[in-house]
Amino acid sequence: SDRRHNSSAQKRTNPDVKQVFPIRYVEPVFRPPSEAQSLILPLTNGCSWNKCTFCEMYSAPQKRFGARDEAEIHNTIRLCGEQFSADVQRVFLGDGDAMVLSTRRLLAVLAAIKAHLPRVRRVSSYCLPRNLRQKSVAELQQLREAGLSLVYVGAESGDDEVLKNVGKGESFETTREALDKLASAGITRSVMLLNGLGGQTLSSQHADNSARLINLTQPEFLATLVVSFPQGEDRFRQAWPLWQPLDPHQLFVEMARLLGALELRRTVFRSDHASNWLVLKGVLGAEKDRLLQQVQDAINRPQAARLRPAWQRGL
């Protein structure tokens, strides 16, 4: 669901000396939209779960899950320091599942980043709720103190029926527990929900229970994407054959229901991913009324709502 990465780090080297880019990427490589200016540092390949039927990111054979060799990772960080030390201020730990690694390994990586890339001010990663079941709050606090400041949690939905139907392997409670554990450790949370994931039948409960999850956990960042299938729906429909997608009008109705049920103190909200028809940006709850009005305008007057053209939604 996220866009492919093109590293923004520039080589600061002697122009007369040919340098080899120090990171071994296994294509395709993905990162959150907000990590566009980050150095993508892969610690794993693929995703250790990789059973979500809506996700195509790690379905290619070369993306079979595995942890990178520790020596390779640390040599990569050292070489990045030699070439990019003055340029890199943000690092994103890839692939889809870096937090599955042990606390010991993650702490060693964070220490190496601090040693070789001293200008780095933010280290982030994707994080599956299941990644945290064997990590205590004390361990997460160690990671935070070592430099891990932000994680992206793909909750997708707060509704247990939806989560079961799409093979997420999580529940409302397991996701809530993970988000609360991160909050206790002081790690910033960016939560992602999939607009339309419940289809026509489960749209209302998908919106209601997702709002309930977000209200209970109060994440610092919240993003919504529209469920999309660039490579086709076959895999998804094998698991949920009766699922029917929402058209743009129905997506806006679901979004209005979600926003209307959210009771947030100060969460930065974004609905600006390439998959979204309607771009929304604001702070919840300070700007809830404005955001709701934008969605209502899209429902009632779609021609005047500045919707994203279909050709711009290519993923």
Image: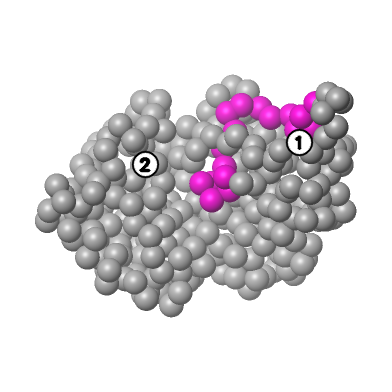
Span colored in magenta: 20-36
Kindly indicate the quadrant of the structure image that contains residue 75.
top right
Residue type marked 1 = Lys
Q: Residue furthest toward the left?
A: 300
User: Hey, which quadrant is residue 25 in on the image?
Assistant: top right
Please give left or right for residue 145 compared with residue 64 in the image: right
Q: Residues within 10 Å of mark 1 (few under 14, many from 20)?
A: some
Residue 238 at least partly seen:
no
Decide whether residue 32 is among the magenta residues.
yes
Label 1 secondary element: loop
| Residue type (three-letter) at the residue carrying disc 2 | Ser
66 or 194: nearer the eye? Answer: 194
In the figure, 58 relative to 290: above or below?
above
Pointer 1: what residue? Answer: 11
Residue labelled with disc 2: 275
Kindly tell me whether residue 115 is visible in this rendering. Answer: yes
- x and y percentages locating residue 66 in the rendered image: 70, 34
At 41% from the left and 37% from the top, the residue drawn is 54
Q: Position of residue 8 (x, y in %)?
A: 64, 40
Dominant secondary structure of the residues highlighted in magenta in the image: loop
Q: Is residue 164 above or below residue 285?
A: above
- Secondary structure under tag 2 reads loop
Residue 145 located left or right of residue 78: left
